[in-house]
Every structure is written in structure tokens, then in C-alpha cells.
Image (cartoon, coloured by chain):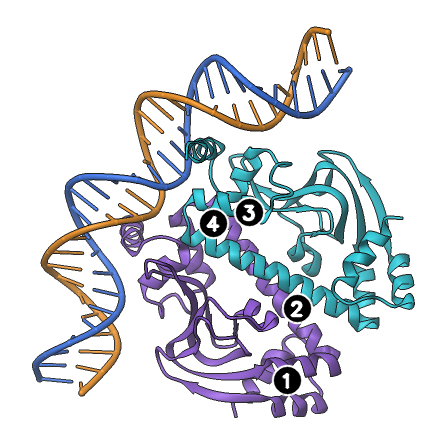
Chain colours: A purple, B cyan, C orange, D blue
Amino acid sequence: MNINKLLTHFSNYIPLNEEEITELSKRVIERNIKRKQFILQKNDVCNNYTFIVSGLFKMYTVDKNGVEHVLHFASENDWIYDINSFHNKKQSSLYIDAIEPSIIIQIDNSNLMYLFTHYQKFERTFRVLIENKFMELETRILQNISSKAEERYQFFLEQYPNICNRIPNVLIASYLGITPEFLSKIRNAISKK
Amino acid sequence: MNINKLLTHFSNYIPLNEEEITELSKRVIERNIKRKQFILQKNDVCNNYTFIVSGLFKMYTVDKNGVEHVLHFASENDWIYDINSFHNKKQSSLYIDAIEPSIIIQIDNSNLMYLFTHYQKFERTFRVLIENKFMELETRILQNISSKAEERYQFFLEQYPNICNRIPNVLIASYLGITPEFLSKIRNAISKK
DNA sequence: ATTTATTCTTAAACTAGTTTAAGAATAAAT
DNA sequence: ATTTATTCTTAAACTAGTTTAAGAATAAAT
């Protein structure tokens, strides 16, 4: 059962006892997602936290010119959700879809709130989780305001070695905030060094 | 007493009862900070969450060329801290200093953890706080990867109308990830519209 | 009130990154 | 196995943003 992967994930923060495992297991659902299948689309309300058992997702906006801007990638043992839409129950401006065929475990808003309220451990774990995600975003912002595209690309390769070769360069460029053509130039320049 | 400003801040999330107020009050300290005074310097461990009663702070790095890069501004009723240094108790790579003379209330790591463990309400409030800060950062990242400097500047002015005219343009440029000279160009272009 | 430090602006020469276009290479679908 | 769609690369012309320098304007300090 894939729930074990989620339990192991939790135990990296704080191990759960039997009651907590039972409660959690009752409140999540497992789904198989095909490549290119959406788990969130613009104007929907994001009603689930999604844990990725296996596979790879991207979360992105589409601007007025139809260009995609990738806000996050997430692969196995990571979470993906539009936090703003989820907590404020408002329409999302984001899309989430699968880059690879994936297996996910989802928990919806009311079940998550139930766990937070009845078992402080869950609230703690999710506090720490979001704190860690906040740190990652701070690092990324710092990169964006202080480094050139080439450095940001090199840093991306170092930081996400296990996903960078599963993601097409078009999407890496989008994530870095540059055009795919310029990323091509950068890659060419690096290979000549 | 300035603790009231902090209590009001909490009650915007979840109101505290008398016991919680007493516990909180025992565990915080109030400080006056002069202009340009540091509350965190590189290589120190950030041991406090800092609530700003009045005044204005910036958190930033200094790169190898001596250039400052502003990660965050924070003014009255907001928090500032290096979350990475605080939770992992490791040396910070950031500086925090006062742009204006300020009054702050600080709570240190062990006291905050005490409150989290004994009163779930504090853990909840700080979870929601960091979630909100995460949303802000997501918006900022999206801006950085998808918009030109002029749009990012306009957005900054709209989003932070009460601090943008208290901050020198050098620092706004740094926050936006552009040079002050280019910000000058942008301001000139906008004023001609 | 005066000096000193900081901030802001302008301009010219430059470089990082974009746009447009088109072909080559690779991966996905049947 | 072949077709179709997607991804990647190259190059030329362009534009957004940087660098260097220097003077003007404003704010801070005494």
C-alpha cells in the first residue's frame, strides 16, 4: 500500500502512533494520474493537499499571451497544492498537472483541519513542512534578485539533481524566468568551458 | 504597554485567553532599536522571532562584491527573522537592521517552543502566519519570473503603499533585483506617461 | 546653520536576455 | 515501424537592464 510512503514521510518529521495512523489512513485517498492530467485548473478551488508517491508535477500560471510560468515542480515524497486557494477557499489562478504518470495521496481541507484540531502532531508537522518550503522560496528569491541566469541554472541542477533530467528544458527555462532559447545559449556556453 | 499591539495582532488570527496572555507576556522582551542598529548579523544564530511595534527593518545579504540584496522589508505589526537560522540553530548568512528608529518585541526560540508545545493556539497562529508569508513569496516569485522590472515596481507600490515612501529607492531597487540607475529610468518613464 | 553623507538622476557605452524564424533532433502516439 | 508532436539549437536583430562616471538634490549630523 502506498500509504506507507506517506507514513515514512511523516516519520521523518515526527513518528505517528497507531491511533494517528488509523485516523490519517481513513481520511486520505489514493489516485493514479496520467501524464498531462490536471489535478487543479484555473478557477477551481484547490480543495486538496496532494502528496506525491511517485511521478512528477508542475504548478504554473498561463499569462495573457498564453505563456506558461512554472512556480513549482514537485516529485515523489513532496507535496503540491495552491496554498492560497486551499486556505482561503477561493478560485485558483494556477494549474497543476502531471509531467509523468503519477500516484498521489490526497487529503481534503475538512479532513486536514480535523487532524490539525484533534492531533497537534499533524499541525506541528505541517507547520514545519511549510516553514521548510518557505526557506526554499527565500533561497530562490535571493537567487533571482542577485544572480545571473547562468548561475541560477547551475544552482538548479545542483539542488534538484534527481528531477532536472526528467524535466524538459522549456519548463526549466520557465521556472528560472528565462526563454528556452536563452537557456540553450547558456547550456552551449557551459559545455564549452 | 506595547505588548497590547502584539496581543491585537494575535487576536486578528485567534484571540488569546487570560492564561495565554499571561504566558506570552512573561516570555517576550521589548527593545528600542536605533536607526542602522543590527538585530541580526551574518554568522550569528538568529535566536529570536521579532515583532515590530513601530518602525521599519530590512533583511538582506551582502554578496562578494559588497552589494546588498534585500530579501524582505518589515514594518509595524509584522514579523522579521531568519527562519532558517532560527529553526536549524545555524549561523545566519543574513543581516537585519533598522531603517527607522523602532520598537520591537522579541521571543526567543525556547520560549516560542514552550508556547507551541503547551498551547496549541500559538502553534496554529504561527502556522497560519508562515502560510501567509509563503503566499506572499509565491506571488513575488511569480512576478520575478513573469514580469518586467517596471511592472514589478508598480506592483510593489500598490502592494506596500504605506512603506514605499519610507524606503530609499536604492533599497527598493535592491528588493526588485535591479540597479538604482535603472529604477531611476523607470520612474522617469512612468512620470512621462 | 553649515558640513558631510547619502540618495537620486542623467547619459553613453555596454551586456544579458528576448524575439522571430527555421531546421534538426528527440520523444510520443498509433 | 512510421507518423506526428514536442523539444532543442542556432543565428541575427533587437530591447531590457547594467556599468561607469559625474553632478544635483536631499537628508542626516553636529
SS of the residue at dot 3? helix
Q: Quadrant of residue A127?
A: bottom right
Q: Position of residue B102 (x, y in %)?
A: 77, 40
> Mark 1 and mark 4, same subunit?
yes
Whether tag 3 and tag 2 are in contact, CB under 8 A, the answer is: no
* Residue corresponding to mark 3: B158
Q: Secondary structure at mark 2?
A: helix
Q: Residue at x 62, y 92 (%)?
A: A26
Callout 1 and callout 3 share a chain: no
Q: Which image quadrant for residue A108? A: bottom right
* Residue placed most toward the observer, A152 or A50: A50
Q: Secondary structure at mark 1?
A: helix
Amino acid of disc 1: Asn
Badge 4 marks a residue whose secondary structure is helix
Q: Report the side of C23 relative to A59 (left or right).
A: left
Name the subunit of mark 2.
Answer: A
Q: Do labels 3 and 4 touch, CB within 8 Å?
A: no
Where residue A111 is drawn, which disc sits there? 1
1 or 2: tag closer to the N-terminus: 1
Q: Residue at x 52, y 75 (%)?
A: A46
Residue at (45%, 46%) from the top-left corner?
B151
User: What amino acid is found at the position of numbered circle 4 in the picture?
Assistant: Asn
Which of disc 4 and disc 2 is earlier in sequence?
2
What residue is pinned by disc 4? Answer: A144
Question: Where is residue D30 shown, x and y percent of the image?
Answer: 77, 15
How far is the residue under mark 2 from the one under mark 4?
24 Å
Above or below residue B173? Residue B115 is below
Q: Earlier in the sequence, mark 1 or mark 4?
A: 1
Q: Is residue A127 above or below residue B168?
A: below
Disc 3/disc 2 C-alpha distance (Å): 31 Å
Q: Is residue B63 visible?
A: no
Relative to A39, D7 lies left or right: left
